[in-house]
Image: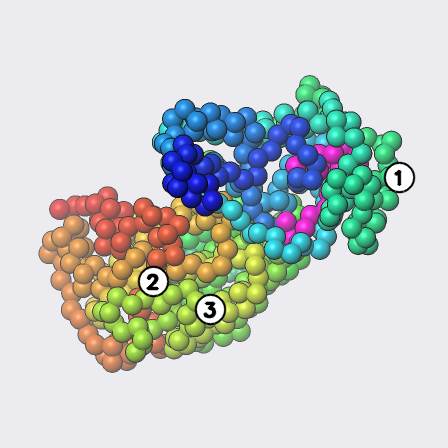
């Protein structure tokens, strides 16, 4: 801001760049990557502040230097350019990657220490403006990390005695051998001194232990036989993401632990849940079974994931809201992520709302509120369109809905971006039953006819009440500006591909 003020006041030709988390050879070891490399070389524990879930955008130093050059020659005076990367990494994953390079067992080497105050969760920069000048990130993570490690192992004494910087919470960084006095730093400093002579030699490039380039993601998915779980597997196959389905039942903690320890996932997706057959009315007469999976099971999985420092993407429901005085039908005012559920008309919804509330205490969970899901597969009886096209009579109420073909890939992306908290996982806007059936008639069956009935008449043929609402999808739209409105999405993803007329 001061530079901009000088530029404007005195006509100085200034351009500002904003970067973060640069890494590479020669960096002072107070920074995470050189610190962990030096500690790994000495066979020392790698101390992680908090749970290591903080995310950083690491960029290799040569790429950043190139960005400066591009900005210098092509940038516009008076402008600001972000130097960033879309590829974010959790601190815990950086530590694991360094362990891999040194053939160390992360479970033995990584130690979690007290978090530091104000440890930012994430810095994310939009670098599109710089990309428009022709710059792009060129060094892939594996390559940059390997080059960095090679430099430190070839120059182990470059920085001299930096033991003060290698302790978990360095305070007086430039004072060799200084300690912050905490118990964990004392232990680590002692271990450091004791094992100065035991340098770990990284595997040579041609040795059998050579680290291989790996796909950085491995997903563990629950709900193999289910609709959403099945579609998720197809998306992973299409995107070339390694994945496996969980074998465990959600209510059995030991089976979940065993899945995670065998599969070693980077992310867990919970598309398992009791949804009731033929519909949610089943839950009214099977309350313990519903609780066992949807409450006990979901919490179990979140807890096990937290213990293993894993993000859990949870396919939850938006059927925990109903139109009310503050959110009247047709008003365009949707329920937001932070709103308190106001619909408990069915046992299914009641338990889902309870679990959602409890999951707020888990910072490793991304809750996606799915609603009245629709897919391009019109032969699937679970598809909302297929359901209402088969009913004798339908109510006619505008609702928020989820077009799975468009949104499920976004849930994969949310996981990759390490997004947490609650998201209304619906397309923006609402569509009514009659509007959908009009489209069905226009694109699929021209002679299609249906008749409506009122909510009161509907109540006579179902056991539990159903929720009708509008959800505010602006948080999701902010994350994915390309997200289509519900009507556009229905046409693009469902009706155009199935067009028969
Ligand atoms: N479809 C919807 O209308 C809708 C709307 C909003 C939200 N959601 C939510 O999205 C999630 C997935 O929905 P879906 O439509 O894909 O459900 P689905 O087709 O009914 O599939 C449910 C899956 O959960 C598994 N499962 C059930 N109990 C389990 C347990 N105790 N342990 C492990 N796996 C278990 C089932 O496996 P088994 O066959 O082996 O039991 C099945 O694979 C659910 O939580 C649901 O509430 C769905």
Task: Name the quadrant containing residue 209.
Answer: top right
Residue drawn at point x = 27 percent, y = 55 percent = 486
- For residue 236, above or below residue 484: above
Q: Is residue 294 left or right of residue 28?
A: left
Residue 51 falls inside the magenta stretch: yes
Residue 87 image point, x, y percent: 50, 38
Task: Out of 38 and 250, give the one closest to the viewer.
Answer: 38
Give yes or no for contact between labels 2 and 3 (Cβ–Cβ under 8 Å): no
Task: Out of 29 and 152, give the one closest to the viewer.
Answer: 29
Mark 2 and mark 3 lie on one chain; the one further toward the N terminus is 3
Q: Is residue 420 left or right of residue 480?
A: right
- Ligand 1's quadrant is bottom left
Give yes or no for contact between labels 1 and 3 (Cβ–Cβ under 8 Å): no
- For residue 490, above or below residue 153: below
Residue 481 image point, x, y percent: 33, 48
Q: Secondary structure at mark 2?
A: loop
Q: Mark 3 vs ligand 1: CB under 8 Å?
A: yes
Residue drawn at point x = 23 percent, y = 61 percent = 431
Give the residue pinned by disc 1. Answer: 194
Q: Secondary structure at mark 3?
A: helix
Cα separation, mark 2 vs mark 3, equals: 19 Å
Q: Magenta span covers which residues?
A: 33-52
Give the residue pinned by disc 3. Answer: 352
Instruction: Tell me if I can see residue 313 in this picture.
Output: yes
């Amino acid at each position: 801001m001061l530079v901009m003020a000088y530029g404007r006041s005195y006509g100085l030709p200034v351009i500002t760049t904003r970067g973060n988390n640069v890494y590479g050879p020669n960096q002072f070891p107070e920074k995470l990557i050189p610190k962990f490399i030096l500690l790994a070389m000495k066979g020392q524990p790698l101390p992680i502040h908090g749970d290591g879930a903080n995310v950083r955008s690491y960029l290799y130093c040569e790429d950043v230097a190139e960005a400066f050059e591009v900005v210098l020659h092509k940038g516009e005076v008076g402008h600001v350019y972000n130097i960033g990367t879309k590829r974010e990494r959790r601190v815990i994953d950086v530590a694991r990657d360094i362990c891999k390079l040194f053939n160390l067992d992360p479970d033995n080497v990584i130690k979690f220490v007290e978090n530091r105050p104000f440890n930012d969760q994430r810095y994310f920069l939009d670098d599109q403006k710089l990309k428009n000048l022709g710059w792009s990130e060129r060094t892939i993570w594996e390559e940059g990390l390997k080059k960095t490690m090679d430099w430190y192992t070839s120059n182990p004494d470059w920085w001299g005695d930096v033991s003060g910087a290698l302790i978990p919470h360095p305070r007086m960084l430039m004072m060799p051998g200084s300690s912050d006095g905490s118990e964990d730093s004392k232990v680590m400093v002692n271990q450091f001194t004791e094992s100065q002579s035991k340098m770990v030699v990284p595997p040579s490039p041609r040795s059998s232990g050579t680290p291989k380039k790996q796909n950085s993601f491995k997903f563990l998915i629950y709900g193999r036989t289910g609709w959403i779980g099945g579609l998720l597997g197809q998306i992973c196959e299409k995107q070339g993401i390694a994945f496996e389905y969980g074998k465990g039942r959600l209510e059995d903690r030991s089976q979940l632990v065993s899945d995670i320890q065998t599969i070693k996932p980077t992310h867990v997706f919970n598309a398992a849940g009791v949804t009731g057959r033929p519909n949610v009315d089943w839950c009214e007469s099977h309350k313990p079974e519903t609780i066992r999976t949807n409450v006990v099971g979901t919490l179990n999985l979140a807890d096990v994931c937290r213990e293993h420092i894993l993000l859990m993407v949870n396919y939850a429901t938006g059927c925990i809201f109903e139109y009310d005085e503050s959110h009247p039908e047709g008003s365009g005012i949707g329920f937001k992520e932070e709103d308190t559920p106001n619909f408990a008309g069915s046992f299914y919804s009641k338990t889902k709302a309870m679990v959602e509330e409890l999951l707020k205490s888990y910072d490793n969970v991304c809750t996606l509120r799915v609603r009245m899901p629709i897919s391009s597969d019109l032969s699937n009886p679970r598809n909302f369109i297929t359901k209402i096209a088969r009913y004798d009579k339908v109510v006619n109420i505008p609702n928020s809905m989820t077009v799975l073909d468009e949104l499920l890939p976004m849930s994969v992306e949310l996981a990759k971006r390490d997004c947490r908290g609650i998201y209304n996982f619906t397309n923006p806007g609402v569509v009514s039953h009659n509007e959908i059936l009009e489209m069905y008639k226009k694109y699929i069956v021209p002679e299609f006819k249906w008749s409506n009935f009122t909510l009161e008449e509907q109540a006579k043929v179902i056991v539990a009440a159903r929720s009708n609402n509008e959800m505010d999808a602006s948080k999701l739209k902010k994350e994915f500006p390309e997200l289509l409105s519900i009507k556009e999405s229905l046409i693009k993803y469902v009706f155009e591909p199935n067009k028969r007329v």
